[in-house]
Image: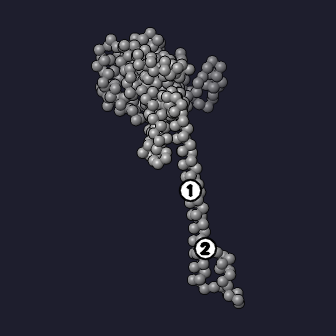
Amino acid sequence: SLDAVENLRSEDGSAPAEGAAADIVVDAVADVVETAAEGEAAALSAAAAAAAAAHEAELRRRAALAEEDEGGAVRPYETLELHQNCSQSDIKRAYKRLALRFHPDKNGGALAELAHLAFQQVVAAFEVLGTPDKRAAFDEVAGSGGAFADFEARWENAEFSWDSDLYKGARDITTLTERLWERRLIGDTIWLVKAYAAWCPACKSHMPKFVSTAALLRDEAEVEVGAINCERPENKRICADWLAVASYPTLVLLNRQYGTFARYPSDTDNGAAAVHTWALETAREWRRLFVRAHIVQLNATSFGETVLDDDKRAWVVLFTDGLVCAPCRIARTNAMRLSAS
């Protein structure tokens, strides 16, 4: 624009009129803006074309897989783009995202048939993983190298449960076992767990309330919901050591990685709304503790140099026999609160 103004100087070297110079500057700026806009539009158009091509390629890949075998039910984790240790909340989010992406109504024209096959894969995968108990059965058989047909037959014949598993097949409640305890309760996932025995009348009468609690927590990423049958022999160690169950039913909130633990007061209302509120409020507090608390893990070697030799700070030390016992983890949770305060 400065060059344009310079070219307008008269032969005697005087500057052009103020209005003419201003018009030229405005025009030059407009040209620059228009050129930039055209470049940006071209870049956006190229990006959109690349995204459309990638989307079509993914539709074709999924459609081809669907035609080769039984589709998403055979490879549910791959179909939903998840790893095997994901949470039930992860599964729900992935299903919603991919179902929307591949829904036939969102993919018209030549892509409609491909989208139909891809969408069916996503639905089939969710039918396997969306129910916690069916997912657990799949992991035990097909997910460990077994045949998918064997998994289907055994699931239909109800070979994966005891008659006393009160929550078998529940949409929002994982029936926990010792094996699943190690596989599902990982990372920073917070679990609301009900410990029960099928012979217990109070456990049975509480069933509708707990199912309703799980339904209220369905879309909350804060908390996963499980139930453990303490009369099964393989679950007794968890019920005794981890949960310290003294009566049925017992409701606890816990996270294994950080060692946090809270027991729902047995003398208060255990209705769906009350437990839902307690679980969410406690879980949200723990999320803050996970970030803000700083607990130093000590041993016989580090205790002296870390604590005894520290001449600048006073230390609050929690002595426990590990983090398995429930009182130990309650104490650790309180130590985290103190550390974060």
Above or below: residue 210 compared with residue 43 = above
Viewport quadrant of the N terminus? bottom right
Q: Residue furthest bottom?
A: 12
**Residues at marks 1 and 2 touching, judged by CB atoms closer than 8 Å:** no
| Residue 292 in view (yes/no) | no
Q: Position of residue 158 (x, y in %)?
A: 40, 16
| Residue 8 in view (yes/no) | yes
47 or 177, nearer to the observer: 47
Q: Position of residue 125 (x, y in %)?
A: 47, 31
- The answer to which image quadrant residue 124 occupies is top left
Mark 1 or mark 2, which has the lower sequence index? Answer: 2
Q: Position of residue 148 (x, y in %)?
A: 50, 22
Of circles 1 and 2, which is in front? 1
Residue 45 is tagged as 1
Q: Is residue 87 left or right of residue 263?
A: right
The amino acid type, in three-letter code, at marker 1 is Ser
**Residue at point 59%, 30% (across, down):** 313
Give the Cα distance between marks 1 and 2: 26 Å
**Residue at point 63%, 26% (across, down):** 306
Q: Position of residue 284 (x, y in %)?
A: 44, 34
SS at badge 1 = helix
The amino acid type, in three-letter code, at marker 2 is Ala
Tag 1: Cα neighbours inside 10 Å, few (<14), some, or many (≥20)?
few
37 or 226, nearer to the observer: 37
Above or below: residue 181 compared with residue 284 = above
22 or 266, nearer to the observer: 22
Tag 2: Cα neighbours inside 10 Å, few (<14), some, or many (≥20)?
some
Mark 2 highlights which residue?
Answer: 28
SS at badge 2 = helix
Residue 230 is tagged as none
**Residue at point 63%, 29% (across, down):** 311
